[in-house]
Amino acid sequence: MSPFIETFGATLNATQWNQYWEALQDVNPGDLDDAMRELRRTHRFHNAPFPCEILAVAQIARRQRVISTPDEPLVGAEPHEGELKTITLRDGTTMNIRVLPDGHHSLPKRHCVRCDDSGFVSFQRQAPIWMYGPNAPLHEYTERCHCTPTNPIIQKRREQNAAHAITITKSRGKE
């Protein structure tokens, strides 16, 4: 990042570097590189771009990358594939089904097995001892998965949600 800032003849103190780091820490490195390359060509001022300007160009780079990622075609399983299993339902009836093995070509591919492409991970940890004493119960916590900034499935879902929100906003404005 230093050579990028120096391109514009700017020098930053430690506090300013910390602010840039805070603003840009979640940006995908590939998007950040694309943003810096674009800003070197198009930035009109002699000072370094603000973090918000870098973020805006990085988001454009992300959108272009997500849009250019083709969807994987769905491939069906053959009727003879998989292991034949008999399942008994609650009412006592039995049913024969074929169970495909993990990694079968017709099963959907996940980019992140940790969050299953949801963007969030749940885990259990002992509740704070200062609140509950030595016999603190387990408490379920949820945090954002580390793949969120780079997962193309999550990014595509965000793009679809944004397009839907724009459509809803426009339709409400016309009423």
Image (cartoon, rainbow, N blue to C red):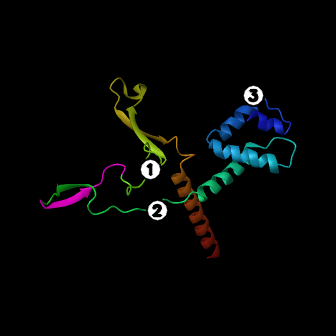
Q: Which badge, 2 or 3, comes first in the chain's sequence?
A: 3
Q: Residue drawn at (33%, 61%), measured in percent from left and top?
A: 77
Location of residue 152 in the rendering, given as x and y in whole percent from the top left corner? 54, 52
Location of residue 143 in the rendering, given as x and y in whole percent from the top left corner? 48, 41
> Which residue range is magenta in the image?
92-103
Q: Residue furthest top?
A: 134
State the SS at label 2.
loop
What's the amino acid at mark 3?
A: Ala
What's the amino acid at mark 1?
A: Arg
- Camera-nearest residue between 144 and 138: 144
Q: Which badge, 1 or 3, comes first in the chain's sequence?
A: 3
Alpha carbon of mark 2 to alpha carbon of mark 3: how far? 49 Å
The residue identified by callout 1 is: 110
Q: Residue drawn at (22%, 59%), measured in percent from left and top?
A: 97
Vertical order, 159 against 147 (above or below) = below
- Camera-nearest residue between 153 and 118: 153
State the SS at label 1.
loop
Location of residue 19 in the rendering, given as x and y in whole percent from the top left corner? 71, 36
Q: Residue 131, which numbered label? A: none
The residue identified by callout 2 is: 73
Q: Is residue 98 magenta?
A: yes
The residue identified by callout 3 is: 14
Q: In the rendered view of the protein, which quadrant contains the N terminus?
A: top right
Q: Is residue 61 magenta?
A: no
Q: Residue drawn at (17%, 56%), measured in percent from left and top?
A: 86
Tell me which corner region of the image, top left, top right, bottom left or bottom right, holds residue 63: bottom right
